[in-house]
Amino acid sequence: MTYGQSPEQFRGVEVAAESTDVNLARVAGELLDWAERTNAPGLPDLVSALGQLGVADLNDAVARLSAHEDPEVRLVVAQALTNPQQATPPTVAALIALSTDPVDEIRSWATFALARESLAHEPGVCDALMARLSDPAQDVRAEAERGLFKDEV
């Protein structure tokens, strides 16, 4: 299941922030903190929307929710981090942690993200992918294989 809408629908938020000198990452971080603190039912949709903006500065704010107690929130965090503009230590650490989640779908999304070529040389990624080769879920194993053996095809 994927949350949120198309990236085009959220582009207006980014444009508005740019035209008014609003620090989008700071505001988004505060909004995420508030939504988490108040147990807002729309937290998964908010995470998805922020992830779909594709703004690199937002990824660290989203990554902070990777250990959230609600599997639905962890799922959208993994989905939101599948294509960050640039890897940062917090986003890589969040994906590595999510790749060990008890929920198969979350592990699959996180492993899919870790298998990207742009993360191949990030610390801990290869070890995380190697660990997923023995995962009980076939989809997770397939993503790990894709990430580890992509140069051999």
Image: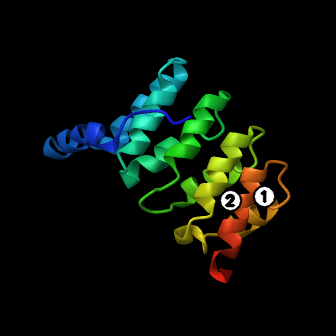
**In this view of the protein, can residue 73 be seen by the observer?**
yes
Q: CA distance from mark 2 to mark 1?
A: 8 Å
Give the residue type that dot 2 points to: Glu
Q: Quadrant of residue 120?
A: bottom right
112, 22: nearer the viewer: 112
Q: Which residue is mark 1?
A: 132
Q: Which residue is mark 2?
A: 143
Count of numbered circles on the image: 2
> Vertically, is 41 above or below 137?
above
Q: Position of residue 71 (x, y in %)?
A: 66, 31
Q: Secondary structure at mark 2?
A: helix
Q: Secondary structure at mark 1?
A: helix
> Vertically, is 37 above or below 22?
above
Q: Kindly indicate whether the residue at mark 1 contacts the one at mark 2 (C-beta within 8 angstroms).
A: yes
In the drawing, does residue 26 fall left or right of residue 39? left
**In this view of the protein, can residue 93 be seen by the observer?**
no
